[in-house]
Image (tube, helix red, strand yellow):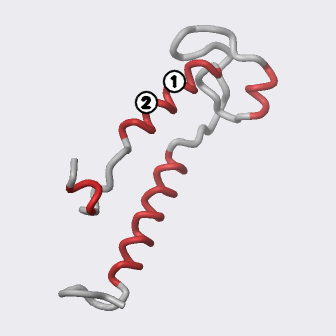
């Protein structure tokens, strides 16, 4: 049930679009191709087990964890004008 001036199903459409955006972002961050033997950031050796487990790996575990933390902190708002983003 929609309220105000929105049409029926508008809220679900917004939810679906947000989920689709999140899935596309996650897919774009997946590694692909040849794995590196040394970390792109700190030049530490990447263990063979990690290179086999994660195809296309470019960072050691420590640098990847830091990169993931930075990316999570940057994506803390909803650009679709949710009430949460309006309060920031």
Image point 74% across, 26% down: which residue? Answer: 51
Image point 27% across, 89% down: which residue? Answer: 7
Q: In this view, does 64 lie above or below 42?
A: below
* Total numbered badges shown on the rendered structure: 2
Can you give x and y, in whole percent of width and height, for residue 63 in the image?
55, 19
Q: Is residue 43 above or below residue 1?
A: above
Can you give x and y, in whole percent of width and height, for residue 19 in the image?
47, 64
Can you give x and y, in whole percent of width and height, for residue 4 in the image?
20, 87
> Residue 83 or 23: which is nearer the viewer?
83
Which residue matches tag 2? 70
Disc 1 vs disc 2: Cβ atoms closer than 8 Å?
yes
Rendered image: mark on residue 50: none
Q: In this view, does 55 lie to the left or right of 81?
A: right
Image point 57% across, 26% down: which residue? Answer: 65
* Element at label 2: helix
> Residue 18 or 29: which is nearer the viewer?
18
Image point 32% across, 55% down: which residue? Answer: 78
Q: How crowded is mark 2: few (under 14 residues within 10 Å), some or many (20 or more)?
A: few
Q: In this view, does 36 lie above or below 83?
A: above
Q: Is residue 75 above or below residue 83?
A: above
Q: Is residue 41 left or right of residue 17?
A: right
* Element at label 1: helix
Q: Please, which residue is most extreme toward the front here? A: 87
> Split into 4 quadrants, where in the image is the N terminus?
bottom left
Q: Please tell me in which quadrant of the rendered image residue 83 appears.
A: bottom left
Q: Residues within 10 Å of mark 1 (few under 14, many from 20)?
A: few
Q: In this view, does 12 lie to the left or right of 44?
A: left
Rendered image: mark on residue 66: 1
Q: How far apart are marks 1 and 2 (CA)?
A: 6 Å
């Amino acid at each position: 049930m929609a309220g105000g001036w929105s049409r029926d199903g508008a809220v679900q459409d917004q939810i679906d679009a947000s989920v689709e955006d999140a899935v596309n972002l996650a897919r774009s961050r997946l590694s692909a191709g040849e794995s590196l033997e040394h970390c792109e950031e700190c030049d530490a050796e990447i263990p063979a087990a990690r290179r086999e487990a994660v195809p296309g790996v470019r960072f050691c575990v420590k640098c990847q964890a830091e990169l993931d933390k930075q990316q999570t902190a940057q994506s803390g708002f909803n650009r679709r004008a949710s009430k949460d983003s309006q309060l920031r």
